[in-house]
Image (spheres, helix red, strand yellow):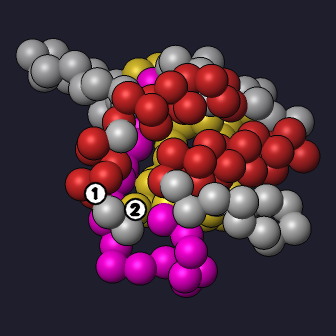
């Protein structure tokens, strides 16, 4: 069971939670980028890469018997915060389609580059499967 941590009087964040509390088996997913399981990029479009990175997260979670509902924390590394902001609706739609509409503790950070030259986003995840 996940408890969303929302201090009294704080404005409710949009699309994420300030914090969550959970108990159970922890799963850590390394940073997933927008290439497929064979390390091939199929697009240089940010939204397409977000969609693929999220698919990759879902597939890794499945190996641990977990689902997106078990995600409690995400960190997004982006090479262009401006494009992320401009394409927020499309990114949100991909997120809801693949991950769901629940809130997780989330951080997004702009970086100057990612290790893979074509990568525009990298997403790492912590999930907890309840005891």
* In-image side of 80 versus 76 (left or right): left
Q: Is the C-beta separation of discs 2 and 1 under 8 Å?
A: yes
Does any portion of residue 22 appear in the rendered image? no
Residue placed under numbered mark 1 in the picture: 81
Q: Measuring 28% from the left and 25% from the top, which residue is drawn there?
A: 14
Q: 10 Å neighbourhood of mark 1: few (<14), some, or many (≥20)?
A: some
Question: Mark 2 and mark 1: span between their CA atoms?
Answer: 6 Å
* In-image side of 14 versus 66 (left or right): left
Q: Measuring 72% from the left and 43% from the top, which residue is drawn there?
A: 55
- Write down the region rendered in magenta: 103-120
In the image, residue 118 lies at what x, y percent?
A: 56, 75
Q: Nearer the viewer, residue 45 or 21?
A: 45
In the image, residue 53 lies at what x, y percent?
A: 64, 52
**Is 113 covered by the magenta stretch?**
yes
Question: Looking at the rendered structure, which numbered label has been put on residue 78?
Answer: 2
Q: Nearer the viewer, residue 24 or 72?
A: 72
Q: Is residue 121 above or below residue 48?
A: below
């Amino acid at each position: 069971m996940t408890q969303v941590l929302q201090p009294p009087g704080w404005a409710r964040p949009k699309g994420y939670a300030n914090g969550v509390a959970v108990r159970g088996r922890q799963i850590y997913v390394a940073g997933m980028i927008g290439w497929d399981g064979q390390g091939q990029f199929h697009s240089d479009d940010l939204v397409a890469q977000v969609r693929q990175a999220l698919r990759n997260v879902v597939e890794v979670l499945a190996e641990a018997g977990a689902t997106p509902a078990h995600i409690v924390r995400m960190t997004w590394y982006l090479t262009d915060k401006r494009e992320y902001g401009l394409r927020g609706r499309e990114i949100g739609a991909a997120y809801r389609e693949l991950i769901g509409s629940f809130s997780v503790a989330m951080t997004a950070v702009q970086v100057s580059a990612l290790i893979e030259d074509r990568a525009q986003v990298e997403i790492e995840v912590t999930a907890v499967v309840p005891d």
